Image (spheres, rainbow, N blue to C red):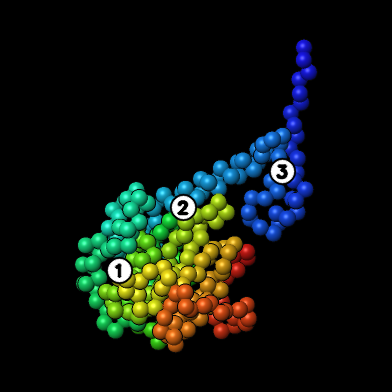
Amino acid sequence: MGNISKPTAASEDPWQALSQFTPARIALGHAGMSLPTRACLDFQLAHALARDAVNIPLDFIALSGHIQAQGYQTLNLQTQAENQRVYLQRPDLGRLLSASAVDCLQRNACPNADAVVVVADGLSSKAIEHHAEPLLSLLLPQLQTNGYALPPVCLVKHGRVAIGDAIAGHYAARLCIVLIGERPGLSSPDSMGIYFTYQAKPGVSTDADRNCISNIHCNGLSYREALKKLLFLIDAAEKLQLSGVNLKDETTDDDLENLPQQANFLLD
């Protein structure tokens, strides 16, 4: 009989120590010519979490209840993407309000609104479920303290970033702030982004007219850091009367004492 080769034991990658500095999949080791079983299973789990973030619907009723419990009104709106399949295949329909949403906005007029706050599920319902309400609990009081008149918070099902333009146009508000679930990655399935536009114009504003604050999640940008960046952009936009590529984020890691305190998720 020929010699029967013994199974090759999994070997650690000599760069293993570097993995402590990044969630990226580096230094995974190997078992023969393949990845170790643990690394394969971790990848499959991360892929499943990312798929769930895209496909599991957001509980808008629960989110609305949490925001109203803070003392703020909400409106539940829908885009022309009638379901998740259409939303993924037709991004253009996620930028347009449905007829029922337009009617709802007309029935809830808010003259002299300065800023609109929009929350859209985007490509990660988990991001909005986990992070929208805590960030709004910091943002909304700060906007009111700064003297901004706010209409109800608009919760948009199957919304893309540009849906904020249509809502801001309806209220004739000069500031448009959109919280949206970002495309999930294999290390951050619940990352939320904030898109800020000054003088948003439906059908005219482009991505070049917006500023993005990205990677808001427990292992990324904190709520307080995101709020600091957004308040800086709002203040600068009011002075320069613009947003987008010509408006740079010049915030630093200096003292944050004047901002509301955020709970440390490591201690919860």
**Mark 3 element type:** loop
In the figure, is residue 216 to the left or right of 104?
Answer: right
Q: Badge 1 local density, few (<14 within 10 Å), some, or many (20+)? A: few
**Gap in Å between the C-alphas at discs 1 and 2?**
29 Å
Q: Considering the numbered disc 2 on the image, is that residue within a helix, a strand or a loop?
A: helix
User: Number of numbered discs present?
Assistant: 3
Alpha carbon distance from label 3 to label 1: 50 Å
Q: Label 2, on which residue?
A: 53
The quarter of the picture where residue 178 lies is bottom left
Closer to the N terminus: mark 3 or mark 2?
Answer: 3
Amino acid identity at mark 1: Gly
Q: In the rendered structure, which disc, 1 or 2, sits on the residue that comes first in sequence?
A: 2
Mark closer to the observer (3, 2): 3
Q: CA distance from mark 3 to mark 2?
A: 28 Å
Q: Is residue 213 above or below residue 90?
A: below
Q: Is residue 167 visible?
A: no
Say whether residue 156 is left or right of residue 221. left
Q: Residue at x 43, y 70 (%)?
A: 208
Which quadrant of the structure image shows residue 60?
bottom left
Q: Residue at x 32, y 50 (%)?
A: 86
Left or right relative to 10: residue 245: left
Q: Which residue is mark 1?
A: 203
Instruction: Depth check: give the residue in front, 150 or 72.
Output: 150
Mark 1 or mark 2, which is nearer to you? 1
**Which residue bears the numbered disc 3?**
29
The kind of residue on which mark 3 rests is Gly
